[in-house]
Image (cartoon, rainbow, N blue to C red):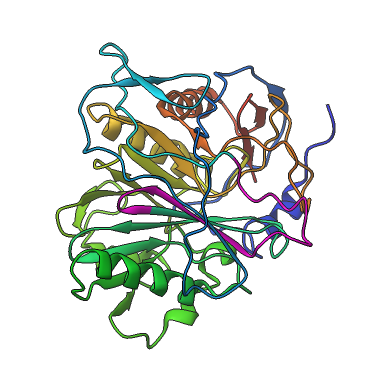
């Protein structure tokens, strides 16, 4: 196995500074173990990308799919071609959204665009910043309700994220009768590679910026009992669960969307190195999220990065500018349970390699 990267280098990967602890300091990594976990289901889907971008600034890549049928409450299992089939025994919601066959991965910066725009479902878009502009290659999510849209994260900078998002909001509004819709700009957490584009939205009409940091997040969503209290936020006919999730960073949240069955987990869980600043708080957060989802139907778990290759247990080099043969973005509820069980079983924090993610205490 090739070497894992040190916490000192990780400081750069976590937005330019080490994440602050929520309730205390973490114990440094003392050992490395390897665990073979449940492999991620490859559900990139049979989507054929088509160019639909109109007014968004160049250079961009846009992919879209035909709007799916209304949400069903049956469960599903993934097939090898990325489709889903009904299964009444798994407790997993049928996926109504589709993912692209390929994300931009930094392998051809001569032709690769700055941002890939993918329409996941009728009212959900996923954006990926090119690794050619940031080795972080972060993902951003845009969720629409009838009254407002929520943007989760704004990328690592040097991309026209405000113009891109406003164009998507304008297009969605025109397709739904032309009434103005409010844009809410928020973040999964406060690290630089997720908030760098926030300031570009300052002063924009019809736009509210939540702000970064625990106090701002608590105030906006009305969370009085942080981090135990889980609240709902209504976009207008689309009610999201806002789950405080400190541990990677003090103000981290997860968002569960019942309309699509997707859990957006930011940097708490994704196919990559899961940097943990405050281990006890992280363990409690992951357990709380799993408990909250116990009676929910979950289709996919989508994080904010990809750092794993398609080889089980193998990650890309730190700051690698391209990701050939990278792991799919999507994980599932089984991975979240696998993570919870792994960190709860640790008597002390340690680096532990799983097939689809790496537990990485700082």
352 vs 272, nearest the viewer: 272
Q: Quadrant of residue 108?
A: bottom right
Coordinates of residue 322 in the picture (x, y in percent) = 76, 50
- Considering every residue shown, the one lying at the far right of the view is 2
122 vs 322, nearest the viewer: 122
Residue 202 shown in magenta = no
Tell me where the magenta segment starts and ends, as one range.
Answer: 102-124
312 vs 165, nearest the viewer: 165
Say if 71 sits above or below 161 in the image.
above
- Considering every residue shown, the one lying at the far bottom of the view is 203
Coordinates of residue 292 in the picture (x, y in percent) = 27, 35
Please name the residue shown 32% across and 45% down the image.
67
Q: Quadrant of residue 2?
A: top right
- Considering every residue shown, the one lying at the far top of the view is 89
Coordinates of residue 38 in the picture (x, y in percent) = 54, 18
Q: Is 97 placed left or right of 277 in the picture?
A: left
Say if 244 sits above or below 218 in the image.
above
Please name the residue shown 31% across and 76% down the image.
208
279 vs 77, nearest the viewer: 77
Please name the residue shown 49% across and 64% down the image.
190
Coordinates of residue 41 in the picture (x, y in percent) = 52, 24
Residue 120 shown in magenta = yes
- Examine the residues drawn in magenta and state their main secondary structure: loop
Q: Is 359 placed left or right of 209 in the picture?
A: right
The mark total stands at 0
Q: The N terminus lies in which quarter of the figure? A: top right
């Amino acid at each position: 196995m090739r070497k894992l990267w040190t916490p000192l280098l990780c400081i750069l990967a976590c937005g330019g500074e080490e994440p602050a602890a929520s309730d205390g300091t973490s114990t440094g990594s003392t050992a490395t173990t390897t665990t073979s976990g449940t492999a991620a289901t490859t559900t990139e889907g049979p989507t054929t990308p088509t160019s639909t971008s109109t007014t968004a600034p160049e250079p961009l890549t846009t992919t879209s799919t035909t709007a799916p049928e209304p949400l069903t409450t049956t469960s599903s299992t993934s097939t090898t071609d990325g489709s889903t089939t009904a299964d009444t025994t798994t407790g997993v919601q049928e996926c109504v959204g589709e993912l692209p066959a390929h994300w931009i991965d930094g392998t051809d910066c001569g032709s690769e665009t700055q941002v890939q725009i993918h329409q996941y479902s009728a009212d959900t878009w996923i954006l990926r910043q090119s690794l050619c502009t940031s080795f972080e290659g972060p993902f951003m999510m845009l969720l629409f309700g009838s009254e407002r849209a929520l943007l989760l994260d704004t990328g690592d900078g040097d991309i026209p994220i405000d113009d891109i998002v406003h164009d998507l909001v304008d297009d969605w509004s025109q397709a739904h009768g032309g009434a103005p819709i409010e844009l809410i700009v928020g973040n999964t957490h406060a690290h630089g590679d997720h908030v760098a584009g926030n300031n570009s939205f300052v002063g924009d009409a019809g736009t509210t910026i939540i702000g970064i940091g625990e106090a701002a997040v608590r105030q906006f969503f009305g969370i009085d009992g942080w981090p135990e209290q889980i609240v709902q936020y209504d976009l207008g006919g689309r009610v999201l669960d806002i789950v405080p999730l400190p541990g990677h960073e003090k103000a981290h949240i997860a968002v569960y969307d019942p309309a699509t069955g997707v859990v957006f987990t930011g940097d708490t869980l994704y196919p990559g190195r899961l940097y943990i600043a405050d281990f006890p708080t992280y363990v409690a957060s992951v357990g709380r999220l799993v408990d909250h989802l116990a009676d929910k139907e979950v289709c996919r778990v989508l994080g904010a990065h990809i750092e794993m290759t398609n080889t089980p247990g193998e990650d890309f080099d730190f700051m690698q500018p391209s990701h050939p043969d990278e792991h799919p973005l999507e994980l599932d509820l089984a991975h979240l349970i696998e993570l919870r069980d792994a960190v709860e079983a640790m008597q002390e924090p340690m680096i532990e390699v799983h097939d689809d993610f790496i537990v990485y205490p700082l």
